[in-house]
Image (cartoon, helix red, strand yellow):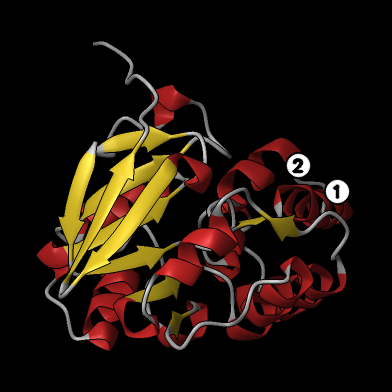
Amino acid sequence: MIFQVKAILFDMDGVLIDSAPAVARVWRKWALKYGLDPDLVVEQAHGRRSVETIRAVAPHMDAERENVKVEQMEIDDKEGVTALPGAAHLLSILPSERFAIVTSATRPLALARLGYAGIQVPRHVVTADDVTQGKPSPEPFLKGAALLGVAPADCLVFEDTPAGIAAARAAGMQVVALQTTYPVRELQAANTIVASLAEVKAAVHEDLILLDAAAIPMVKS
């Protein structure tokens, strides 16, 4: 599938970086500490700000206080945090003013994980600290577009979660989903689905970025 856009917005975890083992370890440990269902908590954690995950699974708790604890646990857990296939290469092709990372991680956590994975921190990053509402709200991606000075309709988003896809679609953007975290059947709201960024070829021509994505077949209704 071919896309012609002016800017690209990348989610971080599950798109540029494989942090799934660390995410699962941290949230399972936290859930078990408080007698919560660890599978449910981990499912909620993917693609969302941690403070919103806590509010969803434990509304009786002080989410802000617990969020500080979880964030430090995530920063400390770097085992297995690596760059995903094709991520570093694709970022190296793109001009720094034409892309941004839009992540549900806080800024300290995002910087830590990028460092663990050996990915250079880009010029433009939108984190959980920069928004009042996280994904699936469109606010994070709209902030990313504004940061780059590009209209939302001229942006392409790379995401790996239903919450992230919903946020991008609500922002009026096209979305390429990566089958790194969820099965294909849960990514159907995207424009297309790829296995990883290694399946995406990019070229920059003046004010346009051309991308050729080797798509995985969508599930038929």
Please provide percent x and percent y for residue 209.
23, 63
Q: Which residue corresponds to mark 1? A: 32
State the residue at coordinates (67%, 73%): 114
Find residue 188 and report its image quarter.
top left
x, y (%) of residue 178? Answer: 46, 41
**Which percent across, then down, holds residue 196?**
52, 41
Element at label 1:
helix
Disc 2, SS:
helix
Left or right, 62 with reference to 135: right
Q: Residue 206: in sight, yes or no? A: yes
Q: Is residue 59 visible?
A: no
Instruction: Classify the position of the N terminus by image quarter.
Output: top left
Depicted 11 relative to depicted 108: above or below = above
Residue type highlighted by circle 2:
Pro
Seen at 49% across and 79% down, the residue is 127
User: Where does the C terminus fall, quadrant-wise?
Assistant: top left
Viewed as shown, does residue 88 lie left or right of 199?
Answer: right
Q: Give the amino acid type for the residue marked by disc 1 in the picture.
A: Leu
Describe residue 101's horizontal placement relative to residue 138 as left or right: right
Of residues 210 and 183, the one nearer the viewer is 210
Compared to 200, does 131 lie above or below?
below
Residue 204 picture location, percent across and down: 27, 66
Mark 2 or mark 1: whose residue is earlier in sequence: 1
Counting other residues with Cα less than 10 Å from the Cα at mark 2, is it few (<14), some (14-19), or many (20 or more)? Answer: some
Q: Is residue 54 left or right of residue 23?
A: left
Residue at (78, 48) in percent of width and height: 21
Spot the residue most to the top. 221
Q: Residue 38 got which mark?
A: 2
Q: Are marks 2 and 1 in contact (CB under 8 Å)?
A: yes
Q: In the image, which disc is placed on residue 184?
A: none
Is 201 or 62 nearer to us in this picture? 201
Task: Work out how far the residue at label 2 is from the one at label 1, CA to CA, in angstroms.
Answer: 6 Å
